[in-house]
Amino acid sequence: VGLVDIGICEDAYLFRIALPGVKKDQRDFSCEVESDGKVLIRGTTTTGEQRVIKNSRTFFMKTQSLCPPGPFTVSFQLPGPVEPRQFTGNFGSDAILEGIVMKQKDRMNSAYLVFQP
């Protein structure tokens, strides 16, 4: 959980973050963007367990590369201040959260916005 790509253009930032096994349930997922460019994502993962039951079979996992199941928090910093109210996000079926947020025009904005799928 949490591999991030960040893109920059003249007036906005784009971020993509990998969230494998994360539920898209509005009660369990949020993405907050603060005016200083901090992005905070909270959710619940469903992968990473030691025992998996699929098709009437029980599998005991030998590798544990994914985040353990349960609540998680990931945060990262965009390169500069942003306008949190001008944020759009999409949580795709490929478990990638993609967000675009406009760069801040002035430094007076200190609000934050919460995105829920």
Image: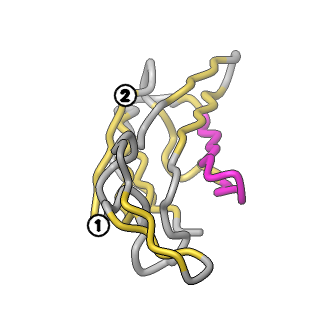
Q: Which residue is mark 2?
A: 77
Up-down relation of residue 63 to residue 24 (above or below):
above
76 relative to 96 in the view: left or right = left
Q: Nearer the viewer, residue 106 or 85?
A: 85
Q: Nearer the viewer, residue 105 or 17?
A: 17
| Contact (Cβ within 8 Å) of mark 1 with mark 2 | no
Residue 17 location (% of width, % of height): 53, 39
Determine the residue positioned at 28% across, 52% down: 73
**Colour setup of the view:** secondary structure
**CA neighbours of label 1 inside 10 A, class few (<14), some (14 to 19), many (20+):** few
Q: Which residue is mark 1?
A: 70
The quarter of the displayed image where residue 93 is located = bottom right
The quarter of the displayed image where residue 103 is located = top right
Disc 1 secondary structure class: strand
The magenta stretch spans which residues? Answer: 90-102
Does the segment drawn in magenta span residue 96? yes
Which tag is nearer the camera, tag 1 or tag 2? 1
* Image quarter in which the C terminus is found: bottom right
- Identify residue type, mark 2: Gln
